[in-house]
Amino acid sequence: MNFYNKIINNIKQVIKGNQTTIKYIVSAIIAQKHILLEDFPGTGKTTLAKAISKSLNLDFNRIQFTPDLLPSDIMGVSIYNAQKNIFEFHKGAIFTTILLADEINRAAPRTQSALLEAMAENQVTIDGKKHILNDNFFVIATQNPLEMSGTYPLPEAQTDRFSMRLSLGYLSQIQEISLLSEKEENSNKLNELQACLSQNDLDLARNQAKTVFISPELKAYIVNIVQSTRKHKDILIGASPRASIDLMDLSKVLAYFDGLDFVKPEYIYELSPFVISHRIKLNSQIKYSGINESQVIKEILKKIPIPN
């Protein structure tokens, strides 16, 4: 049984939601990318993050973002020790492996940006001193829809650091009935969940995914998609080259999950709306007409020939 099947079967014991979204999140962990979940409260985001960390035996921390949250609350603070006559650094919640940044867009932009260095360079700078984070550091950030009160839009530089914007969505009727039955039985499968993979398994999966071949034609296909966002009449700001890199890396992981040693164009087509849509900014005219970013990306995909 390969890496993907092991972790998915383990997570299924706890999470009953959208399996495709869970697959994408696992692929992001393999590719060492960060994820943005746009969801309403109560859809299982915290449970999913904990299930992934337990399955991989990785440390987990959760930060609830609020308007009064400060950067020091996330990164840590130096406190003066009068007895030793020195300042001692107390680590914040960011010093973990899997970080759930819950409702990130409820915090002020200055606090949101406190994550940027960590996500970009796997380090934080506090009081002029650099602190290196775990090699496997991974952020699952959640945000409420911007129409909800008390939310702030994320800075463009930060949204670009998230490889995909996803949504778990609500459970189906059958799934929600099953959830009620488990609660009635006082079943807490999350506490009983055991690790199914080791750090060596994770490292091996990453190394194998990197060896997956992607043809020059498919690289050109990726670049054509991304560059089309910079020329589209309805898009004010197009996607960055980082979108091309993420699209390639994640496509390799999906091929690896399917037991292939080469990327198929279907993976690129499938992933593009999730990788690109949060990185573009629509002009005001199209934005208020009811058309969203994902719809524009799908329109672009239809116009670009898929390589054979």
Image: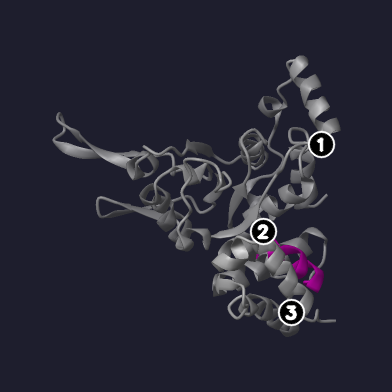
| Residue 112, x across and y down, in percent | 42, 49
Residue type at numbered disc 2: Gly
| Residue 15, x across and y down, in percent | 74, 36
Which residue is denoted by mark 3 in the rendering? 218
In the image, is residue 49 part of the stretch drawn in magenta?
A: no
70 with respect to 155 (left or right) = left
- Counting residues from the start of the chain, the first of labels 1 and 2 encountered is 1
Closer to us: 202 or 239 = 239
Mark 1 element type:
loop
Please identify the quarter of the rendering in which residue 80 is found. top left
Q: Which mark is residue 7?
A: none
| Residue 154, x across and y down, in percent | 48, 54
User: Badge 3 local density, few (<14 within 10 Å), some, or many (20+)?
Assistant: some
Give the residue drawn at x 72%, y 74%: 300
In the image, is residue 266 part of the stretch drawn in magenta?
A: yes
Residue type at numbered disc 1: Ser
Q: Is residue 208 visible?
A: no
The CA span between labels 3 and 2 is 32 Å
Mark 3 element type:
helix
Q: Which mark is residue 290?
A: 2
Main secondary structure found in the magenta portion: helix
**Disc 1 to disc 2: CB gap under 8 Å:** no
Q: Is residue 145 visible?
A: yes
Which residue is denoted by mark 1 in the rendering? 172
